[in-house]
Image (spheres, grey):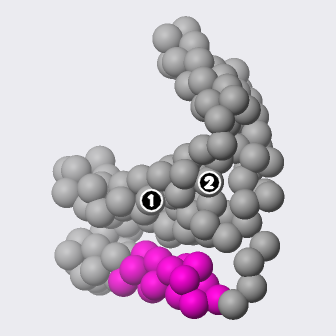
Amino acid sequence: MGGYIGSALFGNILFYIGARWQKLAGTAIFVLCSSMIFTAFYWHSTVFSTLFLVAFAVGLYLISWFTNLDREILMFLGLASIIYIIQDFRVGPSSDLEQYAKLMVIIPRTVWMYIWLGVALLLCFFNLRLVFFSKTKI
């Protein structure tokens, strides 16, 4: 699942795990690092990109293993994933938004931008409500 909604869902899930499920944060980091290593070898395009992704995954795992920053790492990555949605709106003709507007010619690019932004903001709103106003802590 990619694109704006996938990035919003993934970012909100990471943020929620970091904020509310402290016991699951280490496991989430391990799954994230494992998927990065799998991606590095399965979808590699250059040796540099493979080595960079593996080094980043190993570094992230070592930081998680030797410190207590699991929650902060997940919350940062989740927030970065959500902010990326807004950054991608004005990238140019290769953005997901531009390609979607070409396929769905009835609705212009700007309208799609506000639709996806609204969906992403709604997901963030519900996630923040769960994080800050829920009574139970796991």
Q: Secondary structure at mark 2?
A: helix
Identify the residue at image location x=65%, y=89%: 134
Left or right side of 125 for 98: left
Distance Cα–Cα, label 2 vs label 1: 12 Å
Identify the residue at image location x=44%, y=59%: 79
Identify the residue at image location x=40%, y=80%: 121
Q: Which mark is residue 71?
A: 2
Which stretch is magenta?
118-134
Q: Position of residue 115 (x, y in %)?
A: 35, 82
Q: Is residue 126 above or below residue 18?
A: below
- Residue position marked by numbered label 1 in the rendering: 79
Residue found farthest to the top:
47
Q: Is residue 101 above or below residue 62?
A: below
Identify the residue at image location x=54%, y=51%: 72
Q: Can residue 61 be seen by looking at this rendering?
A: no
Q: Is residue 33 above or below residue 76?
A: above
Q: Position of residue 64 (x, y in %)?
A: 67, 36
